[in-house]
Image: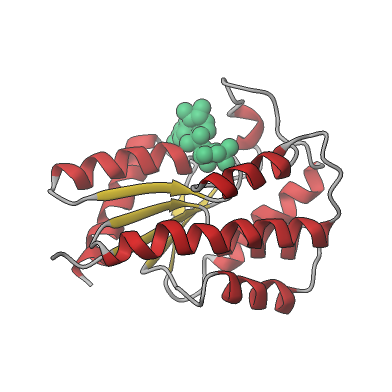
Amino acid sequence: MKKGVFIVLEGPDRSGKSTQAALLRKWLEERGREVLVTREPGGTYLSEKIRKILLDPKSNIEPMTELFLYETSRVKHTLEKIIPALKAGKVIISDRYTLSTTAYQGYGRGLDLKTVETLNRIATLDLKPDLTIVFDMPDRIFSQRERLRSGRDRIERAPDAFRRRVNRAYKRLARRPGVARVDAGRSIDEIQAEVRALAAKALRG
Ligand SMILES: Nc1ncnc2c1ncn2[C@@H]1O[C@H](COP(=O)(O)OP(=O)(O)OP(=O)(O)O)[C@@H](O)[C@H]1O
Ligand SMILES: [Mg+2]
């Protein structure tokens, strides 16, 4: 059986993660790989329920509660989705993972980074991705890419200063080992070409 490969797509809101995930899935499937596209928070029955709570503009959630909700969703997602798919030899493309929590709850909300990273490790049973791609997006692009399907969710309603802290955090996190930075301010096709090259390298091991 083929070896399972775990790829994570990261970056600010509207940086193109879902768009690139769908294109990458198609490309990998055409090459005979079984692919699981999933997302955080979400990806399981329980985790999607938690996602609804987290994104509901009516939820009043202080930062530490927010952190635990993300991590709770993550434990279930890791156990129920990622680990079984890896064992089955699939390529997993996860739209967000631990780096999101470091960026949003750590750098964005200002929670202690050590606490965030400890909880990240516990919630994932220390499972590390084979490749994390950060879509690095200039701040101004957020408002240019308005959502078609719905209004702004609770996280997207956060003040601009929060968004800038998150974007800055991603630039910093993109320098970590195992993390690749991709300039998300270009065309969908240009970005996808780079994503495919990085994925192909991760698949070679
Ligand atoms: N490279 C690009 N250039 C211009 N528009 C883009 C590009 N990539 C994606 N878009 C558009 O920007 C919007 C956001 O893209 P997408 O939903 O893929 O981002 P996302 O990172 O998944 O966002 P979210 O964090 O809100 O889920 C969509 O309308 C999409 O069609
Ligand atoms: Mg998305």
Which image quadrant is residue 98 in?
bottom right
| Relative image position of residue 49 (x, y in whole percent) | 63, 42
**Picture residue at 57% right of the left edge, 67% below the top:** 173
Which of 78/189 is in front? 78
| Relative image position of residue 113 (x, y in whole percent) | 73, 74
Left-right relation of 51 to 7: right
Is 63 located above or below residue 147 in the figure?
below
Which image quadrant is residue 187 in?
top left
Q: Locate the C terminus and report the quarter of the image it occupies.
A: bottom left
Left-right relation of 44 to 107: left
**Picture residue at 48% right of the left edge, 40% below the top:** 16
Report if residue 15 is visible in the image: no
Left-right relation of 130 to 145: left
| Relative image position of residue 175 (x, y in whole percent) | 52, 71
Which of 70/182 is in front? 70
Left-right relation of 140 to 76: right
**Picture residue at 82% right of the left edge, 40% below the top:** 59
